[in-house]
Image (spheres, rainbow, N blue to C red):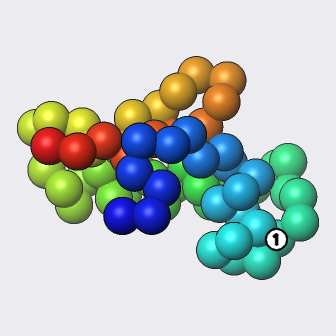
Amino acid sequence: MLNEGRVVTRTMLLEEIWGFRFDPGSNIVESHISRLRAKMGGGKALIATVRGAGYVIKTG
């Protein structure tokens, strides 16, 4: 994975994936992260939230 172990901010995800510049009222990132976590199962979290910074993908 390209960004494995790196913190990826909410803004980076909005810009790269959905082409949004900035949408402070949107919770699209949080919704998709939640769905991804549910699909990966309830065990060990592979997507960690870094409070105040963004998200990081961890290896198993």
Q: In this view, does 15 lie above or below 58?
A: below
Q: Which residue is drawn at 15% across and 35% down?
A: 44
> Which residue reaches farthest top?
51
Q: Name the residue under label 1.
A: 20
Q: Residue at x 51, y 43 (%)?
A: 6
Q: What element carries label 1?
A: loop
Front position in the image: 59 or 26: 59
Q: Position of residue 3 (x, y in %)?
A: 48, 56
Tell me which amino acid carries mark 1: Phe
Q: In which quarter of the image is the C terminus?
A: top left
Front position in the image: 20 or 16: 16
Count of number-bearing discs: 1
Q: Position of residue 14 (x, y in %)?
A: 71, 63
Q: In which quarter of the image is the N terminus?
A: bottom left
Q: Position of residue 58 (x, y in %)?
A: 30, 41
Relative side of 27 to 25, left or right: left
Q: In this view, does 6 lie above or below 33?
A: above
User: Label 1: how many residues lie within 10 Å, few (<14), some (14-19) or many (20+)?
Assistant: few
Q: Residue at x 64, y 74 (%)?
A: 17
Relative side of 32 to 17, left or right: left
Q: Where is residue 21 in the image (x, y as percent from the top left)?
A: 89, 66
- Residue 29 is drawn in which quadrant? bottom right
Q: In this view, does 57 lie above or below 21?
A: above
